[in-house]
Amino acid sequence: MDGSVTSDVLRQHLIDPEICIRCNTCEEMCPEDAITHDDLNYVIDFDKCTMKGDCLPPCPTGAIDSFRKATRPWTIEEQFGWDSLPPDAEPVVESKGPLPEDVVAITENATSGAGGQTLPPWSAAHPYINLYTPEQPAVATVMGNMRLTDESASTGIHHLVLDFGNNAFPYLEGQSIGVLPPGEDENGRPHHVRLYSISSPREGERPGYNNCAITVKRITEDNDGNPVEGVASTFLCGLEKGDEVNVTGPFGTAFLMPNHAGANLLMICTGTGAAPMRAMTERRRRKWARGAREAGGSMTLFFGARTAGELPYFGPLKKLPQEFMDVQMAFSREPGAEKEYVQDRIRAQGKQLAGLLRDENTFMYICGHRRMEDGVEASLTDICAYHDMDWPQIRDRMRLAGRYHVETYY
């Protein structure tokens, strides 16, 4: 086997026959005449449907808000015979071929802090990877671009929502996408791919829609503090609604969240390292809001920034109830307050952290700037020593069990 998918996966708009009340609203609203019906079912013609969504808001039951991944379009005749919707199609294998060399290099560098090969959680869903390549990218449309940090903040961080239309782009929390900036580099070659962690849960930034969100920091200086404009970040942060982006991926097979009941999530991040944490938090929050509070264990987040105004998603995080997630924020430059870094917050919660590290159901995720690694390592070493544990041993045991994950960057 050469590692290629034997059949492509597409996204199809369907109507759920189990909850449809046959009111005819969707057929009346569809401008493409893609919806028709017989004595039993209302159905959608794949070839006519443009996914514009005119039919969605008026539906009184939500039956119209149904989408499935398929290896070929379901015909009208097949839909007429349904009593219920079919399951999503699964790919034959997860990848369309070997990963691009630049993606491999970026990933290896980002995960080097884990201390070795990392496995995914045993209960994680199986990921799709590399379905879209630089030669055949998915074209995504910008549905929204919102600045997350204060205008006065030194760092401009944006939340972008990308819609994939009819292109199936299945992903999981913790995975990344590749963005292909337009234009050429100084050598006249197309720009290399840039990877961005997905910040929305697997069902989409808006549930039921074929979209995802990413968190982008506009690069304005290099590691030495010299002024510079980031090629991809400047392009992405300047996009407007309706603009298009060439996307590759998805990528990532290990930095995934567990799906079994009782799994504790221990998340440590700075800046745009919040992206995968937001995706996992939203996945749990939506289940929690539906009453499925037994679906997971505890959630603890340590989040650091210079000031509250430079902390992405600060407002929504403040609104989360304590019983849902313990949020520990650390600010190193907040006016009128003592300097505090993520590692300081970790030490302050040493007793709680020690209990989580002893629990075989705790899964740890670290994401953010590379310079936080040493401080986090030192704080965890101190906490473990104080509670008669050995952090290096615990870390390696967690990594080999798929419970310790690191993605950091400069």
Image (tube, grey):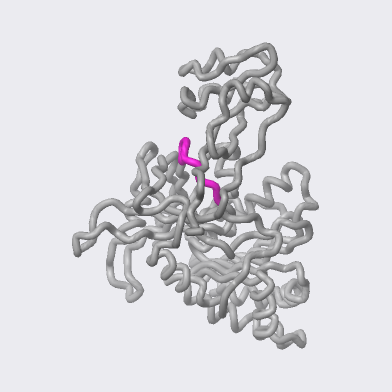
- In the rendered structure, the answer to whether residue 79 lies left or right of residue 249 reads right
Is residue 145 placed above or below 128 in the rendered structure? above
Q: Position of residue 30 (x, y in %)?
A: 51, 18
Q: Position of residue 247 (x, y in %)?
A: 40, 50
Q: Position of residue 143 (x, y in %)?
A: 44, 39
Q: Could you tell me which residue is drawn at 51 percent across and 72 percent down?
A: 111
Q: Could you tell me which residue is drawn at 48 percent across and 54 percent down?
A: 4
Q: Could you tell me which residue is drawn at 74 percent across and 85 percent down?
A: 389
- In the rendered structure, the answer to whether residue 83 lies left or right of residue 272 reads right
Is residue 334 placed above or below 41 in the rendered structure? below
Along the viewing direction, whichever of 293 and 91 lies nearer the viewer: 91
The total number of labels drawn is 0
Is residue 44 placed above or below 206 in the rendered structure? above
Please identify the quarter of the rendering in which residue 259 is found.
bottom right
By secondary structure, the bulk of the magenta-drawn segment is best described as: loop
Magenta-span inclusion, residue 128: no
Q: Position of residue 49 (x, y in %)?
A: 49, 25
Magenta residues, start to end: 164-171
Quarter occupied by the C terminus: bottom left
